[in-house]
Image (tube, helix red, strand yellow):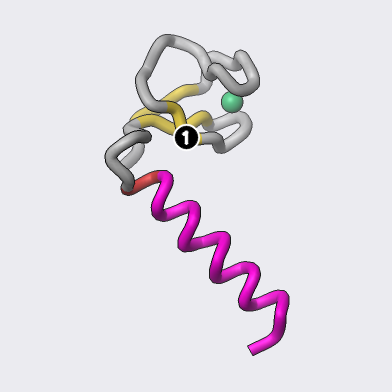
Amino acid sequence: MSLFEKAGKKFEETKRMFTDGKEAEYVCRSCEEPVAENCGYCPHCGEEAVEPVE
Ligand SMILES: [Zn+2]
């Protein structure tokens, strides 16, 4: 496994942890950051692009 593939796999695991974790029930469609609750806008980038994690 190349270093790149390893890093990619790690990223996917981290992403899954964020999206399936108990903290983040929402994710920002704009910056793809996990959002703990739907407050109408993303606390990371300010976009109104927060949607529930499926
Ligand atoms: Zn955002």
| Category of crowding for the residue at label 1, using alpha-carbon neighbours closer than 10 angstroms: few (below 14), some (14–19), many (at least 20) | many
Which residue shows up at 35% across the image and 38% down it? 53
Residue furthest front in the image: 23
Locate residue 19 relative to residue 49 in the image: left or right: left
Q: Which residues are magenta?
A: 1-18
Q: Is residue 17 magenta?
A: yes
Percent x, y for residue 43?
55, 17
Dot 1 amino acid type? Pro
Which residue shows up at 55% across the image and 70% down it? 9
Which residue shows up at 62% across the image and 33% down it? 31
Report the quarter where the C terminus lies: top left
Residue furthest left in the image: 22
What secondary structure characterizes most of the magenta part? helix
Percent x, y for residue 16?
41, 54
Is the C-beta of the residue carrying label 1 under 8 Å from the nearest atom of ligand 1?
A: no
Q: Is residue 49 above or below residue 31?
A: above
Q: Is residue 20 above or below residue 47?
A: below
The image quadrant that residue 4 belongs to is bottom right
Percent x, y for residue 48?
53, 14
Q: Find disc 1 in the rendering and name its residue.
A: 34
